Amino acid sequence: NAGVTQTPKFRILKIGQSMTLQCTQDMNHNYMYWYRQDPGMGLKLIYYSVGAGITDKGEVPNGYNVSRSTTEDFPLRLELAAPSQTSVYFCASTDGLADPQETQYFGPGTRLLVL
Amino acid sequence: KNQVEQSPQSLIILEGKNCTLQCNYTVSPFSNLRWYKQDTGRGPVSLTIMTFSENTKSNGRYTATLDADTKQSSLHITASQLSDSASYICVVSAKGYSTLTFGKGTMLLVSP
């Protein structure tokens, strides 16, 4: 079972460049999340989605955009990369229909370095 | 503001020994508390989830306890193995929200 997959695994960006972090889950989960994890810090929620076509801001949304056109995919877009966006990005999903507090399944992460 | 504090920040133990990690939270209204294990370079993996009415839950050599009155939780690891070396993250969920508050984690190193 693939679970939650993320691409790329690692990327170096120059300041001002843009990129899209891909996230796909094959568990038919309605809820999907994007987090960032800075060194020595807890995960911070960037955006989340409770279903296709529905997205909402988390704790640290500035500088990011998301879309949810299908149940499976939840891409995260960085429009103008800044050094402060250097971090590890994790995508996660859960079966929100059964219970929004269900176990979250995390992807392997995307390591982003902005220089 | 909802907060989750974990201690110690890091811990080194010998293989085969037991250890206990602590988590204090101020999340309200409380829904559930989770412990995750995060191996280096990987995403977090769920170990246990406890609701308000549960005060202990086990998953193999991992046993989590919850005291909802004092807002404290602990994760006890028995007979540690080298593969237990990881960061252990306490996560607390508030009622009515689809978001979680993450602790910074305790970095555990099990030494041979």
Image (cartoon, coloured by chain):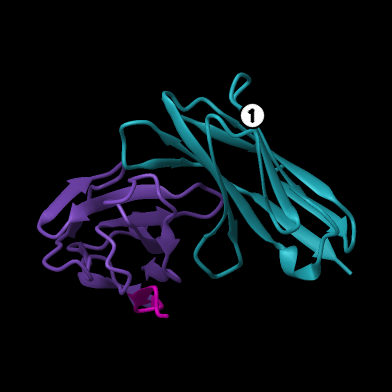
Chain colours: A purple, B cyan
| Left or right, A56 with reference to B27 | left
Percent position of residue B106, x then y:
66, 48
Q: Name the residue under label 1.
A: B72
Highlighted magenta segment, given as a residue range: A1-10
Residue at (11% x, 66% y) in the render: A69
Question: What amino acid is at disc 1?
Answer: Gln
Q: Residues within 10 Å of mark 1 (few under 14, many from 20)?
A: some
Percent position of residue B36, x then y:
57, 53
Identify whether A47 is placed above or below B94.
below
Q: Nearer the viewer, residue B112 or B92?
A: B92
| Picture quadrant of residue A27 | bottom left
Percent position of residue A19, x then y:
22, 72
Residue at (52% x, 47% y) in the render: A41
| Picture quadrant of residue B81 | bottom right
Identify whether B112 is placed above or below A38.
below
Percent position of residue A44, x then y:
40, 47
- Callout 1 secondary element: strand
Q: Which residue appears farthest toward the top when viewing the image?
A: B69
Identify whether B96 is placed above or below A49.
above
| Left or right, A38 with reference to A114 | right
